[in-house]
Image (spheres, rainbow, N blue to C red):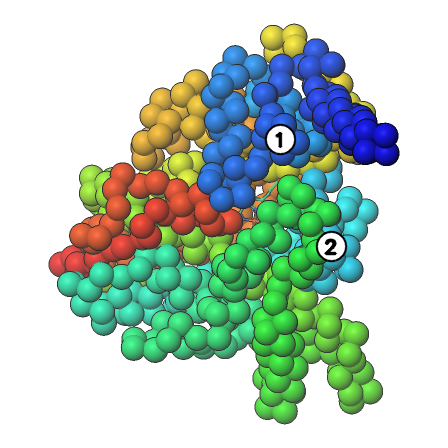
């Protein structure tokens, strides 16, 4: 009798659970929105844990429901709206900032001291303050100044490549991260790092930057949990930046400020800014040091990973498309006399170099998904008249990869075809269809900074070397779905032959 009661209770609990899950996973259908067929309990995004990148999962959804301007999907049991129609994307990213101004995940200081100091992780109130401060560092005058650092680092990169010799097979991703570690150490801290010294290890700047997004399975799991299943963080911990990195930057700031003060040195960079607030009454202010450390890590991360990966992708794409590579070289020859050094104006005005840069980020966008969270109910309506009421709290995903690979928008959707960005092609496309740097008020504030840096390095290498894929390069190029950031299956392997 007792056993029968337990069995009945168990069966009732199971039936209730099933009913609850089915009810949750029909949220969109109950609202008349076309929805996916989510896996029971785990939803649609589970494959993003190991099998596919989040961008690929969303791209598959968009392909399956090709005709739909938006599709309802599920992150475990949470309903998520995937928006694909350019009008609606523009509404979410650009026009209706009151409803969609927040990113999906915001970080409190308790979650992660570092990311809570970044506009990316801040909720809308704190975002305004952080963003305004940040934009002061990206004036044209400042970018012109740091161009000289980019150029020096690019030359060091080319010398490093030359020292390896024409038969050497180089890891393109590592090479580009050595470059951005070198450039960031110069730009932010005025330090000449050893990351591009022939025969040397990549060094502490590289290690500290690289560990943030490539710190092993536990860290990948934390990133996954932040975006897809936050309760897991209570078990595995939520600090995304490891303590070694924090210690490295804390010591770096304190030592640099003290050294400059002792030597009476001045330079317009992060250390100069730190010097103004770090020492109070002759002593190091601990609270200021902590804040500065977090800011320094953010600045370093922002200038290290995505630019390196974009440059690495561009090198690999040019190596595998010799005609396009030759077009970049010919454009450089046309604009610069033999021996004439690269300058800021030229880097910014070469149209084909710019097309290559944009096409690289179209084909392999470093940020494959933009995630917002609705904060005020809003009705989204497509040009075809389909509409959906988005409730507060609902995550809204912009599937960057799906938009960039849409044959209705790009004539050679999965090929490297820089002419996608010729003036005529651009004029023929609706707005909000190129999202390499996002769009609207939250658009990447470092876009010009990154673009000048990547193009300077790219132009320097193309001037001096012919890039070819090494024998071990796996072709055709496919994204490695198991890493948080963009990498290629089998890696990125290049050879550099001097051009006369
Ligand atoms: C090729 C390199 C880069 C790529 C592909 C990239 C891409 C992006 C994308 C897609 C976003 C999201 C935009 C949105 O939500 O609409 C973003 C945001 C952001 N990026 Fe970049 N970025 C790059 C380099 C940089 C650099 C160099 C910096 C700083 C120096 C930077 C700082 C930021 C910050 C702070 C945000 C958050 C902005 C906000 O929420 O207001 N990024 N970036």
Point out which mark residue 234 bears: 2
Q: Quadrant of residue 34?
A: top right
Question: Please, what secondary structure does the residue beneath circle 1 have?
Answer: loop
Residue at (40, 49) in percent of width and height: 487
Q: Position of residue 12 (x, y in %)?
A: 80, 26
Residue 484 visible to an observer of this rendering: yes
Q: Left or right: 431 with respect to 469? A: right
Q: Quadrant of the C terminus?
A: bottom left
Residue at (34, 25) in percent of width and height: 412
Relative to residue 425, is residue 373 depicted above or below? below
Q: Is mark 2 within 8 Å of ligand 1?
A: no
Question: Please, what secondary structure does the residue beneath circle 2 have?
Answer: helix
Q: Quadrant of the N terminus?
A: top right
Answer few, some or many: residues within 10 Å of disc 2's Cα (few below 14, many 20 plus, some between 14 and 19): few
Point out which mark residue 170 bears: none
Relative to residue 119, is residue 423 depicted above or below? above
418 or 343: nearer the viewer: 418
Contact check, label 2 and label 1, Cβ < 8 Å: no
Mark 2 or 1, nearer chain start: 1
Q: Left or right: 229 with respect to 68? A: right
Point out which mark residue 43 bears: 1
Residue at (59, 21) in percent of width and height: 36
Q: Quadrant of residue 428?
A: top left
Q: Position of residue 66 (x, y in %)?
A: 50, 16
Residue at (48, 70) in percent of width and height: 207
Residue sitting at the far bottom: 262
Q: Position of residue 431 (x, y in %)?
A: 55, 25
474 or 401: nearer the viewer: 474
Answer few, some or many: residues within 10 Å of disc 1's Cα (few below 14, many 20 plus, some between 14 and 19): many
């Amino acid at each position: 009798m007792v056993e029968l009661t337990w069995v009945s209770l168990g069966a009732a609990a199971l039936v209730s659970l099933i009913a609850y899950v089915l009810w949750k996973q029909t949220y969109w259908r109950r609202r008349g929105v076309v929805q996916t067929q989510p896996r029971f309990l785990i939803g649609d995004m589970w494959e993003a844990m190991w099998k596919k990148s989040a961008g690929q999962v969303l791209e598959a959804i968009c392909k399956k429901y090709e005709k739909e301007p938006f599709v309802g999907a599920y992150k475990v049991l949470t309903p998520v709206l995937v928006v694909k129609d350019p009008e609606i994307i523009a509404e979410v990213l650009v026009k209706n900032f009151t409803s969609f101004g927040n990113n999906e995940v915001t970080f409190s200081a308790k979650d992660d001291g570092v990311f809570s100091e970044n506009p990316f992780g801040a909720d809308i109130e704190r975002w305004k303050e952080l963003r305004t401060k940040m934009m002061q560092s990206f004036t044209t005058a400042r970018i012109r100044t740091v161009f000289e650092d980019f150029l020096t680092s690019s030359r060091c990169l080319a010398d490093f490549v030359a020292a390896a010799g024409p038969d050497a097979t180089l890891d393109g991703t590592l090479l580009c991260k050595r470059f951005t570690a070198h450039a960031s150490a110069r730009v932010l801290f005025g330090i000449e790092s050893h990351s591009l010294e022939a025969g040397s290890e990549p060094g502490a700047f590289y290690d500290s930057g690289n560990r943030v997004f490539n710190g092993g399975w536990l860290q990948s799991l934390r990133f996954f949990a932040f975006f897809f299943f936050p309760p897991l963080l209570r078990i595995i911990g939520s600090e995304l930046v490891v303590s070694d990195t924090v210690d490295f930057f804390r010591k770096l700031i304190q030592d640099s400020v003290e050294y400059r003060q002792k030597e009476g040195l001045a330079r317009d960079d992060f250390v100069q800014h730190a010097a103004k607030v770090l020492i109070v009454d002759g002593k190091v202010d601990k609270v200021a040091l902590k804040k500065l450390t977090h800011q320094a890590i953010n600045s370093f991360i922002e200038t290290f990973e995505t630019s390196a990966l974009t440059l690495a992708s561009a090198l690999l794409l040019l190596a595998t498309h010799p005609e396009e590579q030759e077009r970049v070289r010919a454009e450089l020859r046309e604009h610069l006399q033999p021996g004439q050094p690269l300058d800021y104006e030229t880097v910014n005005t070469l149209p084909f170099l710019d097309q290559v840069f944009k096409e690289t980020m179209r084909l392999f966008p470093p940020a494959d998904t933009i995630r917002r969270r609705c904060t005020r109910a809003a009705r989204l309506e497509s040009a075809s008249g389909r509409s959906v009421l988005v409730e507060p709290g609902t995550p809204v995903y912009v599937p960057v990869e799906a938009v960039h690979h849409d044959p209705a928008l790009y004539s050679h959707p999965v090929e490297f075809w820089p002419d996608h960005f010729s003036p005529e092609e651009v004029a023929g496309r609706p707005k909000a269809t190129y999202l390499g740097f996002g769009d609207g008020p939250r658009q990447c504030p470092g876009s010009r900074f990154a673009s000048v840096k990547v193009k300077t390095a790219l132009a320097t290498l193309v001037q001096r070397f012919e890039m070819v894929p090494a024998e071990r390069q796996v072709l055709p190029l496919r994204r490695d779905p198991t890493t948080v950031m963009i990498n290629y299956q089998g890696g990125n392997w290049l050879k550099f032959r001097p051009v006369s």
